[in-house]
Amino acid sequence: MAGLFVKVLRAHQWVYERSGGLVGHRLLFGNPTLLLRTVGRKTGQRRTSALTYARDGGDYLVTASNGGSLRPPGWLANLKAEPKCAIQVGRRTVPVIARATLPGDPDYSRRWNLVDEVNRGRYSEYQKRTKRPIAVVVLTPTG
Protein backbone atom coordinates (compact mmCIF):
# COMPACT_ATOMS: atom_id res chain seq x y z
CA MET A 1 0.00 0.00 0.00
CA ALA A 2 2.83 2.42 0.85
CA GLY A 3 4.38 1.81 -2.57
CA LEU A 4 1.13 2.74 -4.28
CA PHE A 5 0.85 5.92 -2.20
CA VAL A 6 4.39 6.95 -3.21
CA LYS A 7 3.51 6.38 -6.89
CA VAL A 8 0.37 8.50 -6.53
CA LEU A 9 2.41 11.31 -4.91
CA ARG A 10 4.99 11.18 -7.70
CA ALA A 11 2.24 11.30 -10.33
CA HIS A 12 0.68 14.26 -8.52
CA GLN A 13 4.00 16.13 -8.52
CA TRP A 14 4.51 15.31 -12.22
CA VAL A 15 1.09 16.77 -13.11
CA TYR A 16 1.68 19.82 -10.89
CA GLU A 17 5.01 20.57 -12.56
CA ARG A 18 3.95 19.81 -16.15
CA SER A 19 0.82 21.95 -15.89
CA GLY A 20 2.78 24.92 -14.55
CA GLY A 21 0.69 24.76 -11.39
CA LEU A 22 -2.64 24.99 -13.21
CA VAL A 23 -3.44 21.52 -11.83
CA GLY A 24 -2.06 20.11 -8.59
CA HIS A 25 -2.36 22.77 -5.93
CA ARG A 26 -4.82 20.48 -4.15
CA LEU A 27 -3.78 16.88 -3.54
CA LEU A 28 -6.26 14.05 -4.00
CA PHE A 29 -7.48 14.45 -0.42
CA GLY A 30 -7.91 18.20 -0.83
CA ASN A 31 -4.67 19.08 0.96
CA PRO A 32 -3.07 22.31 -0.26
CA THR A 33 0.23 21.43 -1.88
CA LEU A 34 3.27 23.49 -2.83
CA LEU A 35 6.38 22.63 -4.78
CA LEU A 36 9.56 23.20 -2.78
CA ARG A 37 12.52 23.92 -5.03
CA THR A 38 15.95 23.35 -3.47
CA VAL A 39 19.49 22.70 -4.65
CA GLY A 40 21.14 19.40 -3.71
CA ARG A 41 23.87 20.07 -1.17
CA LYS A 42 26.12 17.35 -2.63
CA THR A 43 25.17 17.36 -6.31
CA GLY A 44 24.27 21.00 -6.91
CA GLN A 45 21.29 19.73 -8.90
CA ARG A 46 17.88 21.34 -8.65
CA ARG A 47 15.39 19.30 -6.63
CA THR A 48 11.62 19.62 -6.36
CA SER A 49 9.37 18.15 -3.68
CA ALA A 50 5.58 18.35 -3.55
CA LEU A 51 4.55 19.00 0.07
CA THR A 52 1.35 19.64 1.98
CA TYR A 53 1.49 23.07 3.59
CA ALA A 54 -0.31 25.29 6.08
CA ARG A 55 -0.24 29.06 6.39
CA ASP A 56 0.92 30.94 9.47
CA GLY A 57 0.31 34.60 8.75
CA GLY A 58 2.52 35.36 5.74
CA ASP A 59 4.64 32.24 6.22
CA TYR A 60 4.19 28.80 4.70
CA LEU A 61 4.73 25.74 6.92
CA VAL A 62 5.85 22.31 5.73
CA THR A 63 6.69 19.24 7.75
CA ALA A 64 9.86 17.14 7.41
CA SER A 65 8.01 13.93 8.25
CA ASN A 66 9.28 11.58 5.54
CA GLY A 67 6.29 9.39 6.40
CA GLY A 68 7.61 8.76 9.91
CA SER A 69 10.89 7.29 8.65
CA LEU A 70 13.90 7.17 10.97
CA ARG A 71 15.60 9.63 8.60
CA PRO A 72 14.35 13.09 7.71
CA PRO A 73 13.75 13.83 4.02
CA GLY A 74 16.77 14.84 1.94
CA TRP A 75 15.28 18.24 1.20
CA LEU A 76 15.68 19.20 4.88
CA ALA A 77 19.46 18.82 4.72
CA ASN A 78 19.46 20.78 1.46
CA LEU A 79 17.59 23.62 3.17
CA LYS A 80 19.97 23.61 6.12
CA ALA A 81 22.90 23.93 3.68
CA GLU A 82 21.13 26.64 1.64
CA PRO A 83 18.05 28.17 3.24
CA LYS A 84 17.36 30.50 0.29
CA CYS A 85 15.05 28.67 -2.07
CA ALA A 86 11.71 29.02 -3.81
CA ILE A 87 8.26 27.55 -3.58
CA GLN A 88 5.55 27.31 -6.19
CA VAL A 89 2.01 27.68 -4.92
CA GLY A 90 -0.39 27.02 -7.74
CA ARG A 91 0.96 29.05 -10.65
CA ARG A 92 2.88 31.54 -8.46
CA THR A 93 6.58 31.21 -7.61
CA VAL A 94 7.70 32.77 -4.33
CA PRO A 95 11.33 33.21 -3.15
CA VAL A 96 11.61 32.17 0.50
CA ILE A 97 14.05 31.65 3.37
CA ALA A 98 13.64 28.33 5.19
CA ARG A 99 14.08 27.75 8.91
CA ALA A 100 13.54 24.40 10.61
CA THR A 101 11.87 24.46 14.01
CA LEU A 102 11.83 21.65 16.59
CA PRO A 103 9.94 21.02 19.86
CA GLY A 104 12.16 23.43 21.85
CA ASP A 105 10.97 26.38 19.75
CA PRO A 106 8.24 28.38 21.54
CA ASP A 107 6.05 28.39 18.41
CA TYR A 108 6.60 24.75 17.47
CA SER A 109 3.42 23.31 19.05
CA ARG A 110 1.22 25.95 17.46
CA ARG A 111 2.83 25.42 14.06
CA TRP A 112 2.65 21.64 14.43
CA ASN A 113 -1.07 21.87 15.13
CA LEU A 114 -1.59 24.00 12.00
CA VAL A 115 0.15 21.56 9.65
CA ASP A 116 -1.24 18.47 11.36
CA GLU A 117 -4.79 19.80 11.04
CA VAL A 118 -4.34 20.50 7.32
CA ASN A 119 -3.03 16.95 6.87
CA ARG A 120 -5.88 15.46 8.92
CA GLY A 121 -3.72 14.15 11.79
CA ARG A 122 -1.32 12.18 9.58
CA TYR A 123 1.75 13.96 10.96
CA SER A 124 0.83 12.90 14.49
CA GLU A 125 0.62 9.32 13.20
CA TYR A 126 4.03 9.70 11.51
CA GLN A 127 5.55 11.07 14.75
CA LYS A 128 4.44 7.89 16.54
CA ARG A 129 6.50 5.83 14.05
CA THR A 130 9.82 7.52 14.77
CA LYS A 131 11.88 8.63 17.74
CA ARG A 132 13.33 11.64 15.93
CA PRO A 133 11.48 14.91 16.44
CA ILE A 134 9.83 15.90 13.17
CA ALA A 135 10.74 19.43 12.14
CA VAL A 136 8.21 22.01 11.05
CA VAL A 137 9.92 24.17 8.45
CA VAL A 138 8.94 27.82 8.22
CA LEU A 139 9.17 29.26 4.70
CA THR A 140 9.20 33.05 4.88
CA PRO A 141 8.69 34.96 1.61
CA THR A 142 11.52 37.35 0.77
CA GLY A 143 10.04 39.17 -2.22
Image (cartoon, rainbow, N blue to C red):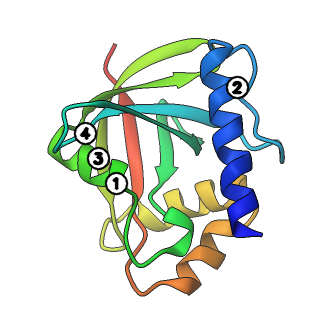
In-front residue for pair 9/121 = 9
**Among numbered discs 4 and 1, the one appearing first in the sequence:** 4
- Name the amino acid, label 1: Gly
> Which residue is identified by label 1?
74
Image position, residue 59 (x, y; %): 46, 35
Q: Looking at the rendered structure, which numbered label has been put on residue 99?
A: 3
Q: Label 1: state its secondary structure.
A: helix
**Among numbered discs 4 and 3, the one appearing first in the sequence:** 4
Q: Label 3: state its secondary structure.
A: strand
**Among numbered discs 1 and 2, the one appearing first in the sequence:** 2
- Name the amino acid, label 3: Arg
- Name the amino acid, label 2: Val
> Which residue is identified by label 4?
40
**Among numbered discs 3 and 1, the one appearing first in the sequence:** 1
Q: Looking at the rendered structure, which numbered label has been put on residue 114?
A: none
* Disc 3 to disc 1, C-alpha distance: 15 Å
Q: Is residue 62 above or below residue 140?
A: below
> Which residue is identified by label 2?
15
* Disc 4 to disc 2, C-alpha distance: 22 Å
Image position, residue 27 (x, y; %): 76, 40
**Among numbered discs 4 and 2, the one appearing first in the sequence:** 2
Residue at 48% over, 15% down = 93
